Amino acid sequence: MNVQEAIEKLNDLELKEFAYGHAMGILSYDDETVAPKGSGIPRGKTMGVLSELSYKLSTGDEARGLLDFLKEHYDELSPEDKRRTDLRDKSMRELRAIPVEEYVAYTELLNDASNVWREAKNKSDYKLFEPYLSKIIETQKRFAGLVRPDMDPYDYCLDQYEEGLTREKCEEFFGALRRRIVPIIEKVKAAEPIDDAFVRRRFPVEDQRRLSRALMEIMRLPEDNCVIGEVEHPFTTGFSKYDVRITTHYYEDNFLSSMYSVIHEGGHALYDLHSDDRFCFTSLEGGVSMGVHESQSRFYENIVGRSREFIELIYPEIVKLSPEMGKHTPEELYRAANVALPSLIRTEADELTYPLHIMVRFEMEKAMIGGDIKTSELPEMWNSLYKEYLGIDVPDDKNGILQDSHWSGGGIGYFPSYALGSAYGAQLLHKMRESFDVAEAIKAGEIGKINGWLEDKIWKYGSLYKPSELMEKAFGAEFDPKYYTDYLERKFTEVYRL
Ligand code: ZN
């Protein structure tokens, strides 16, 4: 075998891996959107079979031999193929350290857990979900120990979502945020409240669906490659640059909730839809990490979507669908969309208090993975952290510990990416402004200008660079959370006329 032949084999292997991921992803998407409630048993079986086949493909003799060959000829590889080799090497180490039966059992556990979580959330009954959460935590700890015995288990969890992120870096980052954000929140609490009652007027779901389509058009989301589904907890699944599914949840008495879900998930979709063609069906296609992904989604949701200029842009569409809204000015809507008040639900939280919701989850995860807390004590810990960080009482588990789907899907270590992504976004804005007037572009509806800049700096690279490398290239500097805290201070001082 020569290098050329090895790369052909690698392409072939990655195409097959893509196919398994695609099939399993479609099953999960189907489960979350339209599959009947009782369809979990066959899906669990199919997922078990496919994940076993995919595991064997990725860790079998042939894949191992190929990886060894690529490592031996590493110096002869292109930068792209070096990165593919590095990524394979990392995941091979992880997959091989975990016995296949445990890997399959875990996939099945997660399938059951997400169904049970949904039921537990509906009934606001943590006890139903607790045994599953307990097993997920135990499995995560066990896998961390098997794969990286040299690493702190929570660092291992964080690294799954943001390569190179550690508990220590999080502590430092969250400490910096808390010092700057808490005093702003205190000032906002003392300021005159903003009247936002009018945004909770009835806005029929059918009209909200029309608004979603208008938003997708404004964002330049191609309808041939991106559709929207309706779910309990909005998310995005990118299968390839040709097929990305976004989702939302409509509330008749809160149209802003879905509007910002669509913009947020649309940001994820844009990222997935714009990998360079040459990365198609390889491990380099799609977003590199959750932090970078969240930097894109939260950039559109908050920096673009909650700007005065964007509200002015979308206002005529809103009034067309809901003429009652026309009694209020775009400025009133802008302020209503930026009400900052400590609240219970992360996904509904405003831009300013949002990072505190993440800090609660960071503390919880540290205790779950690193501490010796019992799973029965977790709701109490959650509630007391909400009291401490946000000053509010949690009435029940539905609005408390059961609100997010992440842990039921094994996503421990995911949450810090949201806050990190928000901070990345603010530094991207700072850099983008050197190229053009971002506010002007939004005002003129030229979202394509923003898309073009992000495509050039971030999207087209897929997973070619490590997250921190990619961001530093885009920033032209090191990451610094001060751009984020400066942005928040400037914005909320202005919104609340502090
Ligand atoms: Zn997101």
Image (cartoon, rainbow, N blue to C red):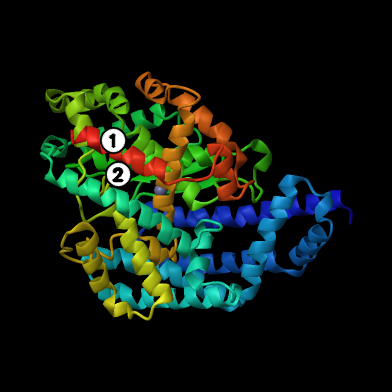
Q: Is residue 141 visible?
A: yes
- Estimate the spatial distance between the alpha carbons at disc 1 and disc 2, rounded to whole Å: 10 Å
Contact (Cβ within 8 Å) of mark 1 with mark 2 = yes
Image disc number at residue 351:
2
Picture quarter with the C terminus: top left
* Res 260 → quadrant: top left
Image disc number at residue 491:
1
In the image, residue 101 above or below residue 473: below
Within 10 Å of disc 2 (Cα), the crowding (few <14, some 14-19, many 20+) is many
Q: Amino acid at mark 2?
A: Glu
Residue 404 image position (x, y, % from top left): 32, 59
The residue sitting at 41% across, 25% down in the picture is 438
Within 10 Å of disc 1 (Cα), the crowding (few <14, some 14-19, many 20+) is some
Secondary structure beneath label 1: helix
* In this rendering, position of residue 444 left or right of residue 288: left
Picture quarter with the N terminus: bottom right
Q: Amino acid at mark 1?
A: Lys
* In this rendering, position of residue 135 left or right of residue 93: left
Q: Is residue 201 visible?
A: no
Secondary structure beneath label 2: loop
In the image, residue 371 above or below residue 233: below
The residue sitting at 59% across, 75% down in the picture is 150
* In this rendering, position of residue 135 left or right of residue 188: right
